[in-house]
Image (cartoon, grey):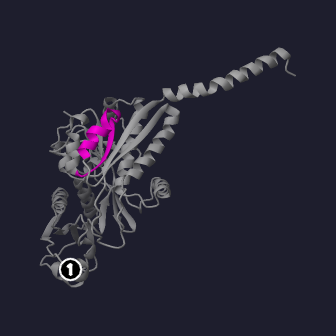
Amino acid sequence: MMRPISLFLHIIFKFLFIIYLPSVNLVYAAAKQTVNVAYLTQEQKIPPPLSNLDAFIKDKGVLGAELAIDDNNTTGEFTGQRFVLKKFIVPLEGNVVDTFSKDIGDQYPYVVVNLPADLLNKIADLPAAKQKLLFDVATVDDALRNEQCRNNVTHILPNRAMRADALAQYMMKKRWDKWFLVIGATQEDGLFADALKRAAKRFGMKIVEEKTWEHTYDARRTAQSDVAVFTQIDDDYDVLVVADEQGQFGEYLEYRTWNARPVIGTQGLIATAWHRTHEQWGAVQIQNRFKEQAGRWMEEQDYGAYLAVRAIGEAATRTKSNEVNKLKDYMLSDAFALQGYKGNPLSFRSWDGQLRQPVLLAAPRSLVAVAPIEGFLHPKTELDTLGYDQPESTCKWSK
């Protein structure tokens, strides 16, 4: 039985504990290191529907960033860090540059940018952006990783060269080395065709025929007859390679060619950072978490934004800092490794800011392979067999 004086001291201590506990918690909360992250994008004009099967998704990217912030804060509970995400969604007719300059300000040293290439570099060149670190989660342009690179921008999604190299490696494994290349009419189609030609030369593929798809009528109505005529060529080939990033005609090539040949490129077998058929290395877990939160499958931009925010969290946790220079130096070092649910840990290339990563090769309803394909070797990491290796790069961003 507790003695009277002990009982009295116990009551006093319990009273003081109840009175001061909220203050202790407030001090602890205030002492947490805060890492502020901005997410910048602009509303998109809804394009004409190419198919009733694929609904337009207006919020690609932001839901991935939100999922990553939750993951960062789960870790932050143990490391004394708090991660805050602020979304800046510019209206369709709004001015992205003004929003960045006036609203993001000095409070957000890390900015996840989901914008086209021209706007990305406009943002990166602003005086207000010089002391920030931008994470590009939308573009695939090779030029942004080479002659147009900026030293305050990292790139998350695989660029066109990485995608083309991934396809070429698999074609080399299958010994499907004779290509018939079909190119769409847009500038983006031409850029992907250039990447495919580079990959073909790099891995010993032979382009036996090259044609531009110039039909302006509805491909759905004319595909049955015209694709057969269009693909009837003198030389034999192993695979039909298509560059149609807008999806204007590529979907109508399969099963309609003159010869029975597989289709790869932007349709058929595609190279992508993420795909709903991917289930290995814990991918099912994040697929299910995202689908429960968003009510839809995770898209590439969602995955890119997720990786960008997780990279910030990983670097902040390891360095125990929220300073831009410290985090950037760590991200570009050999010590940095990011879990990306694709087997190999992901890391940034120090010469151009590109996130090196495996590339998924997927058909509409199955994962076919993951590049780099086994057997392609590199003195540092096999991931650098995809895209521009350091000796090939024309980017000078780290100097």
Residue 87 seen from this side: yes
Q: Is residue 312 left or right of 118 when viewed as pictured?
A: right
State the image coordinates of residue 55 (x, y, percent, origin top left). Answer: 36, 67
Tell me residue 320's x, y (percent).
42, 29
Looking at this view, name the residue that lies furthest to the front.
93
Identify residue type, mark 1: Val
Give the residue drawn at x 49%, y 26%.
31
Check the picture and name the quadrant holding the C terminus: top left
Q: Residue at x 15, y 76 (%)?
A: 215
Q: Is residue 101 magenta?
A: yes
The answer to which of 292 and 235 lies nearer the viewer is 292
Span of residues in magenta: 96-116
181 versus 339 height, above or below: below
Query: Label 1: few (<14), some or many (≥20) within 10 Å?
Result: many
Number of labels in the image equals: 1
Front residue of 252/281: it is 252
Nearer to us in this view, 129 or 45: 45
Asked if residue 242 lies left or right of residue 332, the reply is: left
Which quadrant of the structure image shows residue 217? bottom left
